[in-house]
Structure formats: C-alpha cells, structure tokens
Amino acid sequence: MLLIGEKKFRAKQIYRWLHVKYADSFSQMSDLSENLRAKLEENYTIGSLKQVKKLVSKIDNTTKYLFELDNNCIIESVFMQYSYGNTVCISTQAGCRMGCTFCASTLDGVEKSLSPSEMLSQVYEIEKDKGETVSGVVLMGSGEPLDNYDNVIKFIKLINSKEGKNMGQRHITLSTCGLINKIYELADEDLQITLAVSLHAPNDMIRNRIMPVSKANPMDKLLQACRDYVAKTNRRITFEYSLIKDVNDSAENAKELAEKLKGLLCHVNLIPVNDVKERDYVRSTNEAVKRFEGILTSRGIETTVRRKLGSDIDAACGQLRKRYKDEKR
Ligand code: SF4
C-alpha cells in the first residue's frame, strides 16, 4: 500500500474486504474513500473464477463445479457436507503431470500451476454460491500440491490468517502422491495440517505399475519420510488406498500393507476406485473391500472405507473436467 501512499490500516481493511466479505469489486469497499477506491481500480484487479458447470447431488447436496481460469484452463472443485461441517476439495493445478494410471486429471499433463488466489477463489466462490460456511479444505482435486509447493504453502497461510478466513490448519488436508524430498520440506514448515499420502499399493512392484512417480520415490524411503514427518510434527498421517479389482485388493496385499505400516501413527482410508474406462480398471467388490478392511483392522491399523458422496452425480476424479474439455474440442 505504500506504493499508493496510504496508511497501513487501509491494507487490513482491504484484506478484510477480499478475504472475509469476498468483495468482487473495489467499489463495494464502502469504508474506503472514493479517491482510494479509484486508485485501487486503476492499479489492481480482483481475480475471480468463472463457473462453467455445476452438478448438485439430490441425495446429499454434494456439488461438483468446473471453473474457468483467466487463461481458459478448466479446474474442478467439489463441495461436500459432513456432520462436522462443510468441506471443499480444491485443485492446485489445472491437470497433473504425475501420471497415476487410475486418474483422468493426468491424461493431458499439467496446463498450469495455480496461484494462491486461484486456490482461495475456489473456496470463496463456492461459499458464495452455496450460501454456506466452509470450515475445511482438502487439497485433493487435480494436481500434485507438492509440485506447486510455494503457492500451496502461501495458500495455507492465507486461508489460515486471523485477519482473513481464519480456517484452522487442522481443518486442512494436503494430499500427495508421495514426493519424498517435498515431504521433508513440508515437515520443516511447522504446520498443523493433515498430510495424506496416496499409497495405493503394498509394494513397489504394484505401485510402479499404477503410480509412475514411485520409481523415483520408492516405498521404503517414502514410508521412512512418513515416519520422520510424524516424529517432527506429531501429526498422524493418512494413507489413501484406492482399491482396484485384481490389482491391489487381495488378502496378501492387505497383509503386506499392514506389516509395512506397523508402528506408524497413521490411518488408512480405503477408496473403492471408480471404474476408469481408459485403463480397464474395475471397482473392487464389496466383499474384497470388507476383507481388506478387516485384515488391516485386525492387525491394529486404524482403517475406514471412504463414504461415497454424490453417487447420483458420479464422476471419477477429473472425469467431469475431461468430458467438458473433450466436448469443447
Ligand atoms: S491422483 Fe493426484 S497426483 Fe496422481 S495423477 Fe491424479 S491428480 Fe495427479
């Protein structure tokens, strides 16, 4: 603000308009002088996302959004209602370059790493659209958050700021496909967020097949990084495990996973994967899911099967965005 010769407290006022009242124009900032509003109008713009599609579940109010960014990239965000509050799943990149074979977000690579404000806008736009408060965020939409590290850290600090939305760090979950070096970097940030690591396999042989990123980030080193992360932050880690029929859902797979996670402060989230036509992946049967869960639990690994939200607007992660882009082409 020094640039335009204003007092410091003006910055606080403007910050509040942007991050608490979600103003989308400077003219709304009624406690600023007309002169200052004009100066802001002249020198700055307020970024916004254009909503291009919205699907609302009639069953549980889960709402999927497609937003268009300034450079025409399309991103997907999801609003979810839980008994403990509303959560938004945001994208951190348009597309992704990690290449997980069960994920549609990666089919065209990464088009853009999102700025902190593009991440914040997903939350703010959804709050405005739904007319409801969002109390939690999961960074689990398209993109690998740790591949857009600096912007993601800025986003977390902004959404957590007392002068702004003031979202507790414990209500923020960052999901990574397991970039070991970045997990060590994150451990040094002194954040209280929840780290979710996408494991999806009990060993490198299976993991290499479904997650190419694992070749450079082998499982023993990844799990060591997770142990070190827990030791440094005292925060429990969540492991995401998508169950794919006849790929990673056998009893042997469950036993091997339980053995590897023994003694680690963690929680396993089992996700019966959505069918992926492009890859011939089929959802595990209910019996296989139950068996997998039972084996982990009986070996002392805290495990839950992710509840399926919005089944009537069902679309696997990234599929909605892909379909929209294909139609446009
Ligand atoms: S699952 Fe996540 S990390 Fe893997 S390709 Fe999809 S968006 Fe990227």
Image (spheres, rainbow, N blue to C red):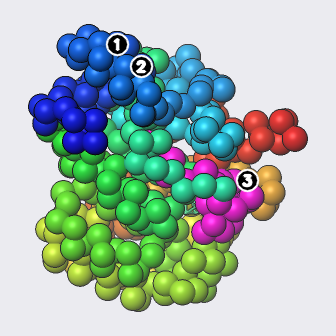
Q: Which residue carries the number 2 mark?
A: 25
Q: Which residue carries the number 3 mark?
A: 276
- Where disc 3 sits, the SS reads loop
- Can residue 60 be seen here? no
Give me the C-alpha separation between circle 2 and circle 3. Answer: 42 Å
Graded by Cα atoms within 10 Å as few (under 14), some (14 to 19) or many (20 or more), the crowding at tag 1 reads: few
Residue 259 located left or right of residue 48: left
Which label is found at residue 89? Answer: none
Q: Position of residue 26 (x, y in %)?
A: 37, 20
Q: Earlier in the sequence, mark 2 or mark 3?
A: 2
Kind of residue sitting beneath label 3: Val
- Can residue 232 be seen here? yes
Position of residue 293 relative to residue 264, above or below, is: above
Q: Position of residue 174 (x, y in %)?
A: 37, 56
Please report the residue visible at 13 percent of the width from the left and 33 percent of the height from the top: 7
Please report the residue visible at 49 percent of the width from the left and 67 percent of the height from the top: 147
Position of residue 85 relative to residue 247, above or below, is: above
Residue 169 vs residue 329, the one in the foreground: 329
Give me the C-alpha separation between circle 2 and circle 1. Answer: 6 Å
Graded by Cα atoms within 10 Å as few (under 14), some (14 to 19) or many (20 or more), the crowding at tag 2 reads: some
Kind of residue sitting beneath label 2: Ser
Query: Which residues lie in the magenta part?
Result: 88-110
Residue 92 included in the magenta stretch of the image: yes
Quarter occupied by residue 166? top left
Residue 261 vs residue 142, the one in the foreground: 142
